[in-house]
Image (spheres, rainbow, N blue to C red):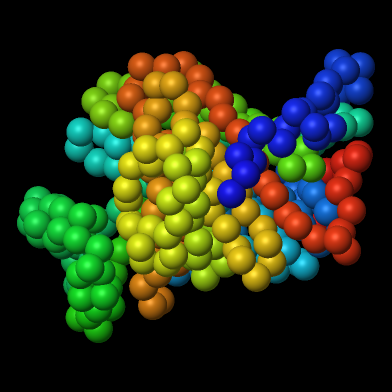
Amino acid sequence: MTNPFSLAKNKKDAKVSFPASKQKMETATSEEPVTIKLTDRLSARLYKDCCPHCMETAPLQKGLVLTLNGKELIEEGLGFGAPVVKYHDKTYFSSSAEISIEKTAYACKVLKKYSLDSVSRKKFWRASYIDDSVYSSLRKTFEKPYLTQKNLSPFFNAVMELRQIAKIKTEFQKVKNRGSITVAYTIKPTLIEISVDFADLSLSGCGEILILNEQGSTVFEKYVDESGLKLFGREIGAWDTVAADWASLVNIKEQLSFSLKKVHGATLFRGWERTRNRFSWAGLSYSLKPNEKTFNYSVRLDFFDRMSTLKTSFDCEKS
């Protein structure tokens, strides 16, 4: 596969500038999503609330969502640019956020401020929550072989489905927040520039920051990277380090892909999970140490469709 980032040299979106006189910032007060059309069929969407509500991640805030022919492709994924922060005591997720919109003649910039205000708890049927120390010990025993033994993935998948039969479920409990992370999305026809600001995040006891870039696993089933490696479905693994300089997740049927590059100071991971009624995500995500104030990267989109026309100007619209 051709390096998708080398194509930027010949693309108009690589030379876009943003005149200050044409910028206008608006706070999004409506619960309606902001949708930016990239082609006649492909769009990017950002919600203020926790939509879309799908399986395990239903109560959590989502990053940027891709849509094709009006259908959202995210499934159970958390979207592009969704932050998760691991502290020594708990892992924090976002269940509330604010968004604002900046319009220019050439691109649409949307800012989303994620409040890190929720933690994951396990609950047995209608009873009380399972003791965290007990469940953590069981999870660690299960997690290592699950992540490393790909040939056993059908077995582990069946075990996770049995957890549902046993009425053990995940709930995200709202707690006192550990600050917030602001993510700016500058959206162009084939490039999404993402800037992450950690200035308002509490770093006390923080061990790791994850910036997730996920869409649905039934949509993106193929992985390719600079080295020529090609993986399909469960071969991709649940959480494996990317050794190549860039990697892509591909939807073969629609000839749609998204690609990310390795960034200095961060580790790039690939992941793909599909468990009935629980997981359905495919992603390329960054792991960071909590020693940076900002983090910048790009998501490259490639959509091979002769029937669609790339947009040269943008409308940030409520849909």
Q: Is residue 154 above or below residue 142?
A: below
Q: Quarter-wise, where is residue 97 in the image? A: top right
Q: Is residue 211 above or below residue 132?
A: above
Is 286 situated left or right of 319 in this image? left
- What is the x, y in percent for residue 240? 32, 48
* Residue at 45%, 56% in the rendered image: 230
- What is the x, y in percent for residue 279? 40, 67
- What is the x, y in percent for residue 175? 35, 44
Residue nearer the viewer, 246 or 31: 246
Name the quadrant of the C terminus: bottom right
Is 130 situated left or right of 103 in this image? left
User: Residue farthest to the bottom?
Assistant: 165
Is 230 situated left or right of 255 in this image? left
* Residue at 88%, 18% in the rendered image: 19
Whether residue 141 can be seen here: yes
Is 47 situated left or right of 103 in this image? left
Residue nearer the viewer, 199 or 150: 150
Residue nearer the viewer, 13 or 179: 13
Q: Is residue 239 above or below residue 243?
A: below
* Residue at 53%, 54% in the rendered image: 249
- What is the x, y in percent for residue 154? 26, 75
Whether residue 48 can be seen here: no
Count of numbered tags: 0
* Residue at 71%, 36% in the rendered image: 7
